[in-house]
Image (spheres, helix red, strand yellow):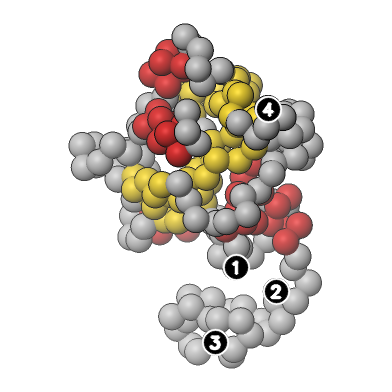
């Protein structure tokens, strides 16, 4: 079973080797930066094993730019390199780490893809506009992820700063949600991400 807070782990607990007080010096900024191997940052072989055993919690972020009245003026997407060397259009998405709050997970994943000066305006309420359940088997739902069964809480997050693509992100592109290019923009998103964009726009009144 998991070890909560600073209770003494029993032999056989998955984190039985964790020492008392290990999290004492950890701050939310450690998670937002995603640096220094914060608690919950699993090695690739271990997370790959877990992906075949349990559902993985995720956050998906639809980045938007708003006008002076708070209305959605642009909606963003990422151009990213795929594992096979291709290019895909997608959204900000990432795991929720162990001992990380949802708010910290949203902030960390935005910074990971858009850079440290994107200045995301995190939602006041943590209630997502939808929950997308990704399955590794095609056809079970609108959402497909060949790696895992993922349960994704989806948020619309206004971006107030400058975007500097990071990690595997090549570029950040924006489109007018009322413009002619929206259908093309959404149509280029595979595995259900286009559906998430449509739901986000409906949720914002677009």
Q: Is the residue under label 1 in contact with that under label 2 (CB below 8 Å)?
A: yes
Q: How far is disc 2 from disc 1 in space, using C-alphas?
A: 9 Å
Which mark's residue is nearer the viewer, 1 or 4? 4
Residue at 60% of width from left, 23% of height from top?
74
Instruction: Find numbered disc 2 in the image and state the secondary structure of the residue it sits on.
Output: loop
Q: Is residue 103 above or below residue 186?
A: below
Question: Of callouts 1 and 3, which one flags the residue occurring earlier in the amino acid sequence?
Answer: 3
What separation in Å lies between label 4 and label 3 (alpha carbons)? 51 Å
What's the residue at 66%, 81% (across, down)?
A: 19
Observer able to see residue 9: yes
For marks 4 and 3, the one nearer the N-term is 3
**Mark 4 Cα-neighbour bin, 10 Å: few <14, some 14–19, many ≥20:** few
Q: Position of residue 36 (x, y in %)?
A: 74, 56
Q: CA distance from mark 2 to mark 4?
A: 41 Å
Q: In this rendering, which labeled residue sits more in front, label 2 or label 4?
A: 4
Which residue shows up at 45% across the image and 56% down it? 57
Find disc 4 in the rendering and name its residue: 67
- Extreme top residue here? 180
Front in this rendered view, residue 112 or 161: 161
Q: Which residue is denoted by mark 3 in the rendering?
A: 9
Name the residue beneath numbered marker 1: 99
Q: Position of residue 202 (x, y in %)?
A: 42, 34
């Amino acid at each position: 079973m998991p070890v909560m807070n600073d209770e003494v782990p029993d032999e056989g607990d998955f984190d039985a080797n964790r020492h008392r007080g290990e999290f004492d010096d950890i701050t939310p900024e450690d998670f937002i930066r995603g640096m220094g191997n914060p608690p919950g940052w699993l090695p690739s072989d271990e997370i790959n094993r877990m992906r075949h055993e349990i559902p993985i919690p995720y956050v998906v972020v639809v980045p938007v730019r708003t006008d002076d009245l708070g209305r959605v003026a642009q909606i963003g997407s990422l151009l990213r390199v795929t594992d096979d060397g291709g290019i895909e259009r997608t959204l900000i998405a990432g795991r929720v780490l162990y001992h990380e709050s949802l708010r910290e997970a949203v902030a960390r994943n935005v910074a990971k893809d858009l850079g440290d000066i994107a200045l995301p305006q995190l939602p006041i309420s943590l209630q997502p506009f939808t929950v997308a359940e990704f399955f590794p088997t095609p056809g079970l739902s609108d959402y497909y992820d060949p790696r895992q069964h993922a349960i994704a809480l989806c948020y619309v997050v206004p971006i107030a700063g400058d975007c500097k693509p990071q990690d595997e992100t090549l570029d950040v592109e924006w489109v007018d949600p009322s413009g002619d290019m929206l259908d093309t923009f959404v149509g280029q998103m595979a595995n259900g991400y286009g559906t998430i964009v449509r739901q986000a726009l409906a949720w914002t009144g677009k």
